[in-house]
Amino acid sequence: MKIAIIGATGRVGTRLTDEAVRRGHQVTAIARQASRLPARAGVTGKDVDATDSAALSAALAGHDAVISTARFAQLNAQQVTTAVRQAGVPRLLVVGGAGSLHVGPGVQLVDTPDFPDAYRAEALAGRDFLNALRSEQQIDWTFLSPSALFEPGARTGHFRVGQEDLLSDAAGKSWISMEDYAIAMLDEIEQPAHSRQRFTVGY
């Protein structure tokens, strides 16, 4: 498949690119300075400011799927969906956040007293992005939320899949490596199971 990754030079974007190439897909790496990425088979870099809707739309045209890894405070849902629609790409997958996952009846993680202030604005913007997608009528979208702790780590291939609730392990730790998250995202591209849904992964 031809997959465009917005924000391909970031920590998550590079791991999504690695996983896609590992599986034999053709990747267009989109970022402001994508041309600085090392040359490699299966990857084409395009220098694009994702907030420029016309430029982003042109870069996305001709792909089977788009993955957006952009920060929600910098690129909102309307900007992304407009570019995807204009490009005629049928599928949009979004690297979500954990803040909008539920930790109790009617309670989302971002609304709990101990949620770090440093991450609150981005988490709230992520919730707004998800809510906007839920009103999207044309694009087949998927929003994949990681667990609370989301850092580089091992590629194990072993994790659990959830829907709206925050996942935690037996010790109460909520976490997923970026490498295993990338597996879940590429699995979803290859074998869609969460059309127009949010889901989550964790150990």
Image: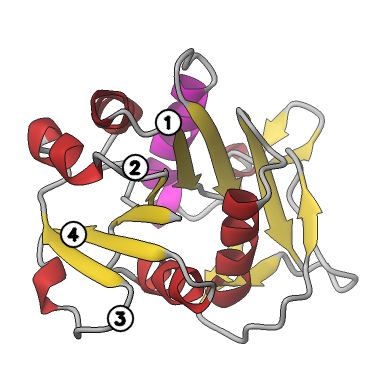
> Which amino acid type is marked by label 2?
Phe
How crowded is the residue under tag 2: few (<14 C-alpha within 10 Å), some, or many (20+)? Answer: many
Residue highlighted by disc 1:
129
| Region rendered in magenta | 118-133
Residue highlighted by disc 2:
72
Residue 93: x and y, percent? 48, 43
Residue 110: x and y, percent? 56, 42
* CA–CA distance in space, label 2 to label 3: 30 Å
Where 203 falls versus 99 (above or below)? Answer: below
Contact, mark 2 vs mark 1 (Cβ under 8 Å): yes
Residue 122: x and y, percent? 38, 45
* CA–CA distance in space, label 4 to label 1: 20 Å
> Which amino acid type is marked by label 4?
Ala
> Which amino acid type is marked by label 1?
Phe
> Which amino acid type is marked by label 3?
Ala
* CA–CA distance in space, label 1 to label 3: 33 Å
